[in-house]
Image (cartoon, rainbow, N blue to C red):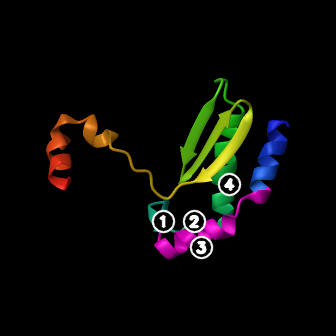
């Protein structure tokens, strides 16, 4: 399936209204001209499509792009779109020796 067709399918299948409802309920805001507000459904669609296009037409063998909570990925010429509310990893603490004491206190 061509990238254009994959993007069309993903954009039709994605529940942008549900994402918008979740963002509204959690008061997740983006900044527009120095003003914070929950993005519109059209803004969500625009960013999602930009993410997908960035990975679809990247010169790299596999590609990832993230913006505004959306993550797009291309592996073996298949596109995927995710909306991620939070990503948690111990790497921030593990890679910064000054934070290891903080990790020990929380354990």
Q: Are marks 4 and 1 in contact (CB under 8 Å)?
A: no
- Viewed as shown, does residue 13 lie left or right of 86? right
Q: Earlier in the sequence, mark 4 or mark 1?
A: 1
Give the CA distance from mark 3 to mark 2: 10 Å
**The disc label shown at residue 39, or none:** 2
Pick whichever, 102 or 49, lies toward us.
102
Residue at 64 percent of width and 24 percent of height:
60
Q: Which residues are magenta?
A: 12-28
Tell me whether the residue at label 1 lies in contact with that at label 3, contact meaning CB atoms closer than 8 angstroms.
no
Residue 85 spot, x, y in % from top left: 49, 59
Please tell me which of labels 1 and 3 falls first in the chain. Answer: 3
First-in-chain label (4 vs 3) = 3
Q: Residues within 10 Å of mark 4 (few under 14, many from 20)?
A: few
Residue 96 is left or right of residue 5, and the answer is: left
Crowding near the residue tagged with mark 1, few <14, some 14–19, many ≥20 C-alpha atoms within 10 Å: some
Q: Are marks 1 and 2 in contact (CB under 8 Å)?
A: yes
Local SS, label 2: loop
Label 2 near label 4: C-beta < 8 Å? no
- Residue 38 is left or right of residue 86, and the answer is right
Residue that numbered label 4 is attached to: 46
Task: Tell me if mark 2 has few (under 14), some (14-19) or many (20+) residues whose alpha carbon lies within 10 angstroms of its own.
Answer: some
Circle 3 residue: 21
Distance (Cα) linking label 4 and label 1: 16 Å
In the rendered image, the vertical position of residue 42 relative to residue 80, given as above or below = below
Whole-angstrom CA distance, mark 4 to mark 2, is 11 Å
Element carrying mark 3: helix
């Amino acid at each position: 399936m061509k990238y254009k067709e994959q993007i069309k399918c993903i954009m039709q299948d994605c529940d942008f209204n549900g994402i918008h409802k979740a963002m509204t309920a959690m008061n997740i805001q983006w900044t527009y001209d120095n003003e914070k507000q929950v993005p519109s459904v059209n803004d969500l669609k625009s960013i999602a499509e930009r993410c997908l296009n960035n990975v679809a037409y990247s010169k790299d063998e596999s590609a990832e792009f993230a913006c505004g909570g959306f993550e797009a990925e291309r592996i073996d010429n298949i596109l995927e779109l995710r909306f991620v509310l939070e990503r948690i990893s111990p790497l921030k603490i593990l890679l910064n020796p000054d934070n290891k004491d903080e990790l020990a206190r929380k354990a």
